[in-house]
Image: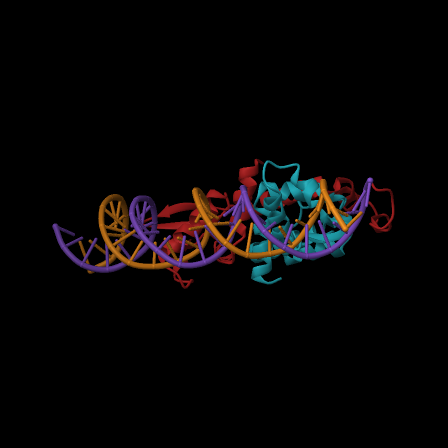
Chain colours: A red, B cyan, C purple, D orange
DNA sequence: CTAACGTACAACCAAATGGTTGTAGATGGC
DNA sequence: GCCATCTACAACCATTTGGTTGTACGTTAG
């Protein structure tokens, strides 16, 4: 994932209206104008928010008649999580801790013990 | 977590320079001026980036002599992840899957098996 | 066909962002 | 004490962002 991709992803998520739009678009049944009714702003403003989400790869649009249905990309959460994982890996080298959490028994997971890496 | 908190969190992460600063601040040994040497911008610019990270709760600063050491907040990744989780929960209703991951034994945690919810 | 609806997009504007320089306050070394 | 270093912060500037209105285009309903 390139820097610009991650930029767009986090930037799209850094707005309460856009996060709310995402929540409403899970089932892909909301048209842009339908969405616009839910917010105290113009249709064009909502359209722009959807465009930001689209450029970030968080939603896709699909025509149905004259409306445009907005649907969350199923892989979106995964990609956001992966971006976080890449950061976390760089930050702490926690790949091992992750695997331990997944594979080993609870007694070994105490973060206050053990060598630094 | 309030909307504004999540806004600040994702906004702070939506910049490649700030993400890179974070990666360098895991061990809390970097002063602001030492950080500034690493980037093709002024000291004040880096200072501002650090301030954004600080307001987002991603780093804390600690005086050592005349320098200010920047250190990543250990809980930062957790909070970012939690913000994503809250979105994912709203998106897909995955609360139950989360609880299963936390409460049950490893054999049940295979994501490839089991019903949709 | 015509009217209404849903969408797209351009132009415009205020506010925020990301950068700069400059100035001033603490702290440590000599 | 004095100077160099690290930091903080204000003022300024260009660009982006998030909103507006207006116009144009395709599609469906009547």
Query: Is residue B103 rendered to the left or right of residue A39?
Result: right
Query: Is residue B64 rendered to the left or right of residue A3?
Result: right
Task: Quadrant for residue B34, please give it.
Answer: top right
Residue A74: in sight, yes or no? no
Percent across and percent down for residue A44 are 36, 54
Depth order, front residue of A44/A76:
A44
Depth order, front residue of A32/C19:
C19
B5 vs B70: above or below: below
The quadrant of the rendering that contains the N terminus of chain B is: bottom right
Residue B42: in sight, yes or no? yes
Percent across and percent down for residue B106 are 77, 48
* Residue at x 69% of width, y 44% of height: A88
Query: Is residue A28 rendered to the left or right of residue A100?
Result: left
Percent across and percent down for residue B5 are 60, 59
The quadrant of the rendering that contains the C terminus of chain B is: bottom right
Depth order, front residue of A91/C1:
A91
Percent across and percent down for residue A8 are 52, 43
* Residue at x 67% of width, y 44% of height: B22
Depth order, front residue of A11/C18:
C18
Count of numbered tags: 0
* Residue at x 61% of width, y 47% of height: B49
């Amino acid at each position: 994932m390139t820097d610009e991709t991650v930029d767009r992803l986090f930037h799209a998520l850094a707005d309460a209206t856009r996060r709310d739009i995402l929540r409403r678009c899970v089932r892909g049944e909301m048209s842009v104008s339908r969405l616009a009714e839910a917010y105290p702003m113009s249709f064009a403003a909502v359209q722009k928010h959807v465009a930001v989400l689209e450029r970030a790869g968080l939603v896709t649009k699909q025509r149905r008649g004259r409306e445009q249905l907005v649907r969350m990309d199923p892989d979106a959460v995964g990609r956001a999580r992966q971006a976080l994982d890449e950061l976390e890996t760089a930050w702490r080298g926690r790949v091992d801790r992750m695997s331990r959490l997944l594979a080993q028994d609870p007694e070994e997971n105490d973060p206050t013990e053990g060598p630094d890496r």
